[in-house]
Amino acid sequence: MTWQAPSLLCVACLFAAIHANAADAYDAAVAHAGRSAADLKRDSLDHPADILRLSAIKPGMRVADVLAGDGYYSELASYLVGPKGKVFMINNAAFDHWSDGPLQARLTADRLGNVEHETLDLNHMNLERGSLDAVFLIKVYHDLYWVDSEGVWPKIDTSGVLDQLARALKPGGVLLLVDHSAKAGSGNSAASALHRIEESYAIKDFESHGFKVIAKSDLLRTPDDARDQVSYKGPMLGKTDRFVLVFRKAAH
């Protein structure tokens, strides 16, 4: 019999099993008292406990939620890393503007004391080398390739951003990536018009910056999505096919 390497999906199952003893922490974060009605409604679409479980973040870690928007995942991460951990909720000026209201409500009265909101130019984040245990890019990686003809969105040096994140992660640190699927063979060409990106392109992109896929999940798949409509509004809002990947930075 010829031995075959396990599929990445199997790797994901093994990866999750290794951290099964931490499962209660992820469920508890989602069940935490005081979460907003809007967040609770979003839970059924995002399955955050299962997605965060893949990242294996735990108490004491330092996590950057990049282009965090109003901070849905930042809040959940704050419960997971605890008082000895830190969550950097990073937006650029555009994301702050689009998140106005819910963002301020989430952070009011220092209700998340271990979360630090920062408004940065992504091309110059000035993240300290080796300072992070994990990075989240949740449905925003495609925006790094968005070319905006109306001038609302700044030009981003995507390769430079990925280099910055790689430098900021500790050796062995993880990057959790979720994004809206584009058609096979489309690369990053749908980023501007449809706010989608091709999964295989994403894998190659991150691998070229020193990352390796260690887990993936089909939990957010929607097979009947034709991948030809805008992801964030209209009939596909909340109904897109989404890929989920966990990368690890090389240990040396």
Image (cartoon, rainbow, N blue to C red):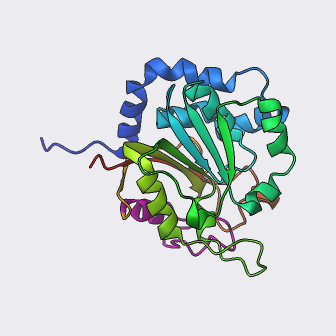
Whole-percent x, y for residue 180 in the image = 61, 57
- Secondary structure, magenta segment, majority class: loop
The range drawn in magenta is: 182-207
Q: Which residue is pictured at 12% across the width and 41% down the height?
A: 1
Q: Residue 180: say if magenta.
A: no
Whole-percent x, y for residue 219 in the image = 56, 40
Whole-percent x, y for residue 52 in the image = 55, 35
Q: Which residue is pictured at 56% across the width and 37% down the height?
A: 51
Whole-percent x, y for residue 139 in the image = 63, 54
Is 106 situated above or below 122? Answer: above
Task: Indicate the quadrant where residue 114 lies.
Answer: top right
Which residue of the protein is positioned furthest toward the right in this rendering?
101
| Left or right side of 54 for 236 | right
Q: Nearer the viewer, residue 215 or 182?
A: 215
Is 104 situated above or below 239? Answer: above
Q: Is residue 21 visible?
A: yes
